[in-house]
Image: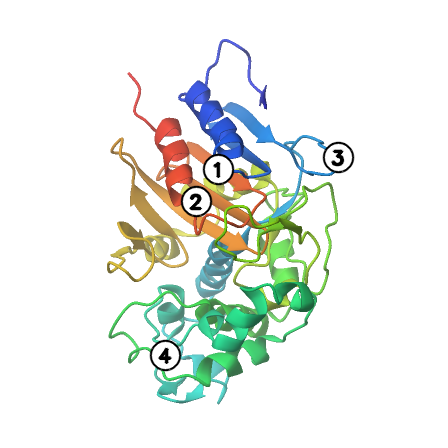
Amino acid sequence: MNAQATTPASLIVPGQAEIQRLLDAAVTEQGYPGMIAEIRNGTQQWFGSAGVADTATGRPRTPQEQFRVGSITKTFTATLVLQLAAEYLLSLDDTVDKWLPGLVRGNGHDGSKITIRQLLNHTSGIFAYTLDEGMLDRYWTPKLLEHRFDKLTPEDLVKIAISHPADFQPGQGWGYSNTNFVLAAMIIEKAAGMSYADAVAHRIARPLKLTGTYAPGGETGFRGPHPSSYSKLMLPDADAPAHDVTELSPSYAFGVGEIISTAADLNTFLGALLKGWLLPPAQQSELFTMTPVPDGKWLDGYSYGLGISSVTLPCGTTVYGHGGMITGTWSYLYGTRDGQRVLTQNVNGDWGMPPAGLFIDVLDAAFRPTA
């Protein structure tokens, strides 16, 4: 177990000791290989870790390492869409059919009635392709070991989604659907005239100097130092073996959960977004048009805007950001509305379904009001 302070000893990040205790407990009591938390509090920064990056070598987790961020990708995707809207290259009121004619059609789905805004706030009614029985069998059972290098196109994912009935008519309900952000990323490519990976690089990573952040596309490995990622293949037995699934094809998470980043980069990104550095005021207002998530539909007690969520912690502080899971890893990225305090967390194991209690405990310690 270890912690690395990156600020002078006299500048203590609030909750630092309690956060380190929670990191240690994540390893010793909950069985994760390793966990990290990096806090940026104004000009102060603190990195804490517990456990290991690799169970075979015992090497520690480090601040520089890259990891898959899962659905935190959605916040990047929404930011790109809103930037394009600010430049009048698209409108949030455009229909899916305007950009992807005929793609979303059948089983109650109608792309001519679904707007881009409804994609980003999960009110489209489009079925989530990740809930398809074949996808669940491929990625959420021991069959994952046979399929983790499968390559799927965005069109494949949409086709899987619309083979099922729509969940509800556009604007008539709320339902978290990964299909929404596959479509949003496809629209980004059309409107920006470049690949989704290039849009992430040119519009977000390079301007913010995020040197460890990128959308990997067809790459199955990492471009920099990284922890190993472990999966128990969704087996409920606490003693189920953990398999190394570090390398995989993220094509099944196009625009949804594919991005690779670092803790410091994620904190920089969210801090900039919350402060309004990435979007003009009109689009920033759209981003934070929050709707309470109906109970049982996603994470109870959360609200959702356009690719960003909020939750009020037990300490009373409301934080904004997103969580993410992709095979082998869970992450959480949240900050205060003014962007002054942001926190990235990651565990390199995908069990826990999700470890939201652990993540909330760390957030509560980090964002507790101080005198």
The residue mark sitting in front, 1 or 2, is 1
Residue identified by numbered label 2:
355
- Is mark 4 in CB contact (under 8 Å) with mark 2? no
Q: Residue at x 44, y 70 (%)?
A: 180
Q: Amino acid at mark 3?
A: Thr
Image coords of residue 327 (percent x, y): 58, 56
Q: Residue at x 73, y 38 (%)?
A: 56
Left or right of 145? Residue 232 is: left
- Neighbor class of circle 3 (other Cα within 10 Å; few <14, some 14-19, many 20+) is few
Sequence-earlier tag: 3 or 4: 3
Q: On screen, 281 above or below 118?
A: above
Residue 114's disc is 4
Residue identified by numbered label 1:
30
- Neighbor class of circle 1 (other Cα within 10 Å; few <14, some 14-19, many 20+) is some
Image coords of residue 163 (percent x, y): 46, 86
Image coords of residue 11 (percent x, y): 48, 13
Which one is in front, 86 or 199? 199
Q: Amino acid at mark 1?
A: Gln
Q: CA distance from mark 2 to mark 3?
A: 25 Å
Residue identified by numbered label 3:
57
The residue mark sitting in front, 4 or 1, is 1
Sequence-earlier tag: 4 or 2: 4
Sequence-earlier tag: 4 or 1: 1
Sequence-earlier tag: 2 or 3: 3
